[in-house]
Image: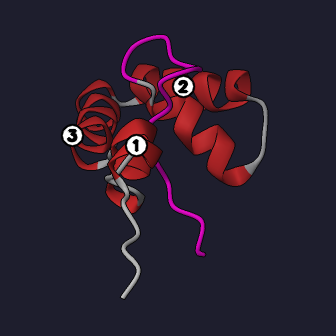
Amino acid sequence: MSKKMMRSTNDKMVAGVAGGVAEYVQIDPVIVRLLFALAILSNPPLGLLVYVLMAIIMPRDEEVEGMMNPFTEDEIVVKDS
């Protein structure tokens, strides 16, 4: 299965974007947060626009897990034919 970029529900401070990006590229989330802060400080409209768009576009990790397996073990019934 391919790796997908998702907002983190476990490692988040605002919307989980930095935590999700950090998990995707496998680096410390603090580094990603600092890069977002630097982008926002150097060009506020563009930095905020990128962050907000990523927060809107990226699915939360729990939403993606739900799409992969929408059924719980109790809901799956195997019938003999």
Q: Residue at position x 67%, y 42% from top?
A: 23
Does 56 appear above or below 41? below
Alpha carbon separation for disc pair 3 and 1: 33 Å
Does 26 appear above or below 30? below
The residue furthest right is 27
**Which residue, given by chain and number where applicable, does mark 1 sit on?**
74
Q: Nearer the viewer, mark 3 or mark 2?
A: 3
Residue 64 position within the rendered picture, expressed as x and y whole percent measured from the top left: 38, 51
Quadrant housing residue 48 = top left
Q: Is residue 14 magenta?
A: yes
Residue 59 position within the rendered picture, expressed as x and y whole percent measured from the top left: 32, 46
Residue 7 in the figure: left or right of residue 35: left
Q: Residue at position x 58%, y 30% from top?
A: 19
Alpha carbon separation for disc pair 3 and 2: 21 Å
Does 52 appear above or below 76? above
Q: Nearer the viewer, mark 2 or mark 1?
A: 1
The kind of secondary structure the magenta stretch mainly shows is loop
Residue 40 position within the rendered picture, expressed as x and y whole percent measured from the top left: 40, 24
Q: Residue at position x 50%, y 31% from top?
A: 8
54 or 49: nearer the eye? 54
Q: Amino acid at mark 3?
A: Ile
Q: Secondary structure at mark 2?
A: helix
**Which residue, given by chain and number where applicable, does mark 3 sit on?**
56
**Which residue, given by chain and number where applicable, does mark 2 sit on?**
38
Residue interval drawn in magenta:
1-15
Quadrant housing residue 2 = bottom right
Q: Secondary structure at mark 3?
A: helix
